[in-house]
Amino acid sequence: MAGGVLANGEIGRLIGLVSRLPGLGPRSARRIVLALLRDPKGRMVPLARAMQEAAASVRTCSRCGNLDGKDPCHICMDPSRQQDVVCVVESVADLWALERAGTYHGVYMVLGGVLSALSGVGPDDLNLRPLLTRLDEGSVREVILALSATVDGATTMHWLQERLGGYGVSITRVAQGVPVGGALEVLDDGTLAAALSARRPVV
Amino acid sequence: MAGGVLANGEIGRLIGLVSRLPGLGPRSARRIVLALLRDPKGRMVPLARAMQEAAASVRTCSRCGNLDGKDPCHICMDPSRQQDVVCVVESVADLWALERAGTYHGVYMVLGGVLSALSGVGPDDLNLRPLLTRLDEGSVREVILALSATVDGATTMHWLQERLGGYGVSITRVAQGVPVGGALEVLDDGTLAAALSARRPVV
C-alpha cells in the first residue's frame, strides 16, 4: 500500500502479505482482501483455517520429494501404481501437471530444480539420492526424464543420462513435438524441427 | 482441481478455496499454494494469522460504511479531517482509491452499490441513512458525489441530487475529463466531449 489510510492496521498488513504472493500485486491484493472482508465467516475464516491445517500437516515425501499430508506420500504408497517406473521432474508443480493429465501410473522423483550455472545450482543441490538408493536396490525398471525443454533442462537431462547410465535400467525422455490443439503455423522453429525429426509412421 | 491426485486432502482443499478468490483461477491458485507450501512458517502461517485477526476485528463503520478495526472508523474519528464535507462513494474500494490519491481531507459515505434496474438494486438497498441523519443535524456543509461515470453511476447521482436537494447544502460532483498522463488520441468520444464542455480558463 502506498502510505495513507491502509499503511497500518489489520487490513493494510493483510494486503501487504497477499500482494507478495506470486502473480499478485497491490491492486489484485486489495481486490482479494476486500472480497474476503465482505464475507469473513464464509470466506476468510475457512481460508485461514485451510492454510493453518496445510502448514501443520503437509510435508515433503522422503521417497520422492512430493508435497503431501503423509510421508511417504500417497503416490509412493499407492499399490495400484507401478513402483518400478520413476518419472524425474523438476518441481512439484510439474508432478501436479502430469497427475492432471491422468495417464501416468508410475511414481516420481522431484529434483527440486535443474542444473544452472547462472543460478549456481549444482548436482549436489538436486534431490537425486532417493532415486539412486532405489536403483541400487534394483527396484527400478525404467526412468522417464520429464524436464522442461529449456537449456538448463536439457543440460540436466544429459547429466542424468550419464549419471544413471551405469545402472542398466531403461532411460527415456518425454517426446517433443506439436502441442495437442496447437496450430502448426504459430509454432517456433525449434519445436517444428523436433517434431519433424521425431516423426512416427502412421499406424 | 480437475480430479486426480489433488481432489482431496489439505492441498486440494486449499487450492479450491484460493481459486475462488476474485481474479484467480485454478492455475494461479496452484502457483500461490505451492509458493506458500514451500515456506509454511515464513509465509503461510503469517498469512493465515493475518486473516484470522482481520476476520475477528474488522467491522463496517456505522457512520460511513468503511471497513476498519474500529467503529466509528479512524477516518470518521480523525479530528484533522473536515467532518462537514462528505464524499459519497459506491464501495470501500473507491474510498481506498481516493485515500491513496491523498488529497481529500473530508469524510465519506459508502453507499455499498449504485442504483441498478438490471441487478435489482433500489434506493432502499443503498446505505444512505447515516448521511441523511447528519444532514438533519445540520452538520454537513458539502456533499461530493464521486460515483463511477457509468450509466448506473449517473442514474444514482441524479437520484442523489434530487434526494439531497432539499437540505440546502452544496452538492458537487467530481470532474470528468482527460486522465492525468492520458494521451488525447486514444480517449473515447464521451470523455473527450466531457473534457471539452468542462473546459476552464488557463490561469
Image (cartoon, coloured by chain):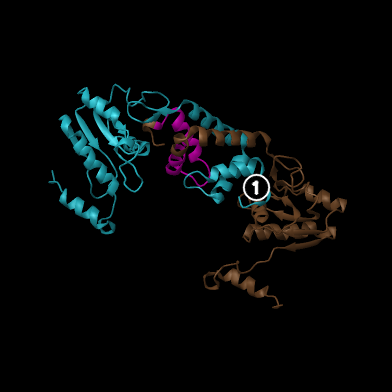
Chain colours: A cyan, B brown
Residue B31 sits inside the magenta stretch: yes
Residue at 86% across, 51% down: B136
Magenta residues span: B6-33
| Residue B2, image quadrant | top left
Examine the rendering and report whether any part of residue B79 can be seen. yes
Considering every residue shown, the one lying at the far right of the view is B137
Give the x, y percent position of residue B14.
Answer: 48, 33
Residue at label 1? A7
Q: Secondary structure at mark 1?
A: loop
- Front residue of B169/A45: it is A45
Left or right? Give the position of A197 relative to A107: left
Residue at 29% across, 52% down: A182
Residue at 61% across, 73% down: B193
Left or right? Give the position of A71 relative to B111: left
Compared to residue B121, the image places residue B38 above or below, namely: above
Query: Which amino acid, by three-letter code, is at mark 1?
Result: Ala
Dominant SS in magenta: helix
